[in-house]
Amino acid sequence: MLRSVKYSRETRLALSTVFCLVWPSVLSAAEYHAAPKGESVSAGAVIREVNLARQNPSLYAMYIEELCSRFDGISVVFPGEAKWRMKEGLDGIKEAVRFLRTIRAERPLALSPGMCRAAADHCADQVAGRTGHRASDRSSAGDRLRRYGIWTGFWGENIAYGRKTARAIILALIIDDGRPARTHRKNIFDPGFNYAGAAYGPHALHGSVCTIDFASGYTERPTKALIGRSF
């Protein structure tokens, strides 16, 4: 299951590492090879995959094209994953491949610790089985991002449920099966985004939840100024 939202506007803190593990810098292109086998899902792993897709879309087209051989007429199986029933069938996979082979490379996103904390808040809020972008306290992604920094320009949010690896998360979001507007895909490749944060954790209904937040600009709050939330 996938969720996506994007909004624009001018211009809590007890977190478990199960939801967010932060690398404070953008990974270089030289570090982008095959996803390490057995690598746990983390903020760094997820944003690395996002940046790999942005910087080398033709390579990611190959990853998605490989899924054609894993399609049984109804479902596709990501490596190490359960079957994913495709609403659009093989056409959805092929459309994603065509898209990736026609777009230009985009600059990588900087991994933001504050944005990771905002994403972790949402994952923690959904442990019991909630879904969607609106939290139990009615906060939006933009509200959560403001707890840990100041965002400018645009912000966006993608949510993926039930995926077990960082690569499977991004593959599913790019294919964006059953969503003609391809809003998840648009967030990943939006040239207006410069910062991102991610978190991953357990989910009572789908097994796992991954939240990815995006922003055009983001300034981290000083540690003493953070607005924490307890769950």
Image (cartoon, rainbow, N blue to C red):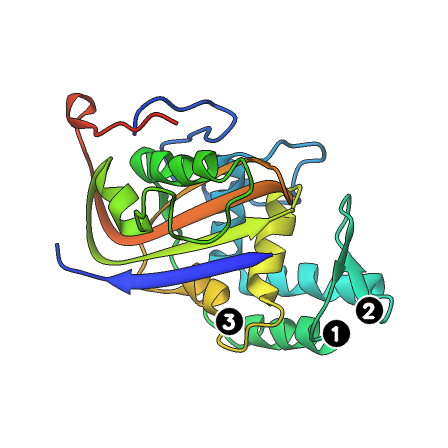
Q: Residue 5, relative to residue 166: is it above or below?
A: below
- Contact (Cβ within 8 Å) of mark 3 with mark 1: no
Q: Secondary structure at mark 3?
A: loop
**In x, y percent, where is residue 7?**
29, 63
Q: Which residue is under mark 1?
A: 89
Q: Which mark is residue 74?
A: 2
Q: What is the C-alpha distance between the residues marked 3 and 2?
A: 20 Å
Q: Amino acid at mark 3?
A: Arg
Q: Of circles 3 and 2, which is in front? A: 2
Which residue is at 49% across, 40% downward? 126
Q: Earlier in the sequence, mark 3 or mark 2?
A: 2
Q: Amino acid at mark 2?
A: Ile
- Contact (Cβ within 8 Å) of mark 2 with mark 1: yes
Q: Which residue is under mark 3?
A: 182
Q: Secondary structure at mark 1?
A: loop
**In x, y percent, where is residue 72?**
87, 66
Q: What is the C-alpha distance between the residues marked 3 and 1?
A: 15 Å
**In x, y percent, where is residue 220?**
21, 36
Q: What is the C-alpha distance between the residues marked 2 and 1?
A: 6 Å
